[in-house]
């Protein structure tokens, strides 16, 4: 066979890969990678707790980055899927926020903060404040005296985590559901449920669901992940600032 007759590598036809929209595969791949790597990181940290002893404290800074590593896979799978089978991050997701994304995102981020505050306030009256620990202080409390690592932690909370989570939930999953003509309001609720479950905080599940709906509204109104990214970052900004206030 002549070289001129060689066929190019097969690509997605109408967005389908192995009979499913590539967003489904990207979502499942990102989710599976996240949980598998989380187990691996937990094993490393646990073994470190046993073996480090008195030398554990200096290692707390790098553990901030280690704790974020599984989150990277949440965004990496949708990015790879878009580059391989889609049209690229900007075309598939509208990832770079524009002026309208900023306005809508900031408004929805404010509503997300309000929703989380109100729901948590109600649940505290029902279950008591002892049931509602601050997850950020549990993870990052050990670096309160190190400004450099606090800055790294704040950047992860405000920029890193929103970017990876939005690419997975309101990027790959949202696009896949849209491909199958799932009504937008159903998509909004489903992605909010996934968003809430992803955080693994049962006591804050209802609050996270409300916040997820508010953040997802930015995606629904604009049709772009850039808007929900801004909303998510705005929602995470006050808790990140509290890390400095409590240090």
Image (spheres, rainbow, N blue to C red):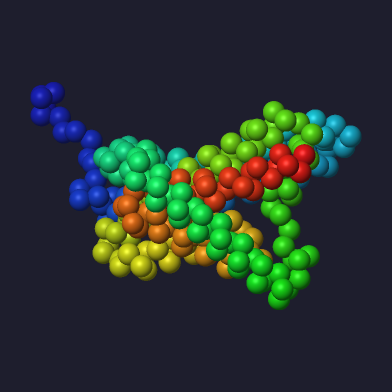
Residue 124 placement, left or right of 233: right
Q: Residue 23: horizontal and vertical position, in percent? A: 35, 51
Q: Position of residue 24 (x, y in %)?
A: 36, 55
On screen, residue 87 above or below 181: above
Residue 71 located left or right of residue 22: right
Residue 208 visible here: no
Does residue 183 appear in the picture of this structure?
A: yes
> In the image, what residue occupies the spot 59% across and 36% down?
155
Q: Percent x, y for residue 69?
A: 58, 39
Query: Residue at point 71% right, 54% down?
Result: 134
- Badge count: 0
Residue 2 against residue 231 in the figure, above or below: above
Judging depth in this view, the residue of 175 and 217 nearest the camera is 217
Residue drawn 69% across the image and 45% down it:
242
Q: Which residue is found at the position 72% from the left and 73% from the top? A: 125
Left or right side of 105 for 245? right
Q: Quadrant of residue 142?
A: top right
Extreme residue toward the bottom, this view: 126
Name of the residue lying farthest toward the right: 54
Q: Quadrant of the N terminus?
A: top left
Image quarter (top left, top right, bottom left or bottom right) of the C terminus:
top right
Q: In the rendered view, does 133 fall on the left or right side of 209?
A: right
Provide residue 147's location: percent of width, then percent of height: 72, 30
Q: Nearer the viewer, residue 46 or 217?
A: 217
Quadrant for residue 21, please give it.
Answer: bottom left
Between residues 114 and 139, which one lies in front from this camera angle? 114
**Relative to residue 71, is residue 123 depicted above or below?**
below
């Amino acid at each position: 066979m002549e070289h001129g007759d060689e066929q190019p590598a097969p690509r997605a036809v109408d967005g389908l890969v192995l009979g499913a929209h590539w967003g489904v595969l990207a979502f499942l791949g990102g989710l599976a990678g996240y949980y598998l790597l989380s187990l691996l990181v937990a094993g490393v940290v646990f073994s470190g707790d046993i073996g480090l002893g008195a030398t554990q404290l200096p290692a707390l800074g790098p553990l901030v980055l280690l704790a974020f590593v599984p989150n990277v896979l949440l965004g990496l799978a949708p990015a790879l899927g878009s580059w391989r089978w889609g049209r690229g991050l900007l075309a598939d997701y509208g990832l770079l926020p524009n002026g309208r994304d900023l306005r809508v995102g900031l408004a929805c981020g404010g509503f997300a903060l309000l929703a989380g505050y109100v729901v948590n306030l109600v649940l505290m009256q029902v279950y008591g404040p002892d049931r509602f620990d601050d997850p950020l202080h549990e993870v990052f409390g050990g670096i309160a005296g190190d400004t450099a690592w606090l800055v790294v932690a704040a950047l992860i909370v405000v920029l890193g985590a929103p970017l990876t989570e939005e690419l997975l939930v309101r990027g790959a999953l949202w696009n896949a559901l849209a491909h199958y003509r799932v009504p937008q309001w159903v998509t909004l609720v489903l992605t909010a449920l996934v968003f809430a479950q992803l955080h693994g905080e049962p006591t804050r599940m209802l609050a996270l669901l409300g916040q997820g709906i508010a953040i997802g509204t930015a995606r629904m109104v604009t049709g772009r992940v850039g808007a929900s990214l801004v909303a998510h970052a705005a929602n995470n900004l006050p808790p990140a600032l509290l890390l400095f206030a409590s240090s």
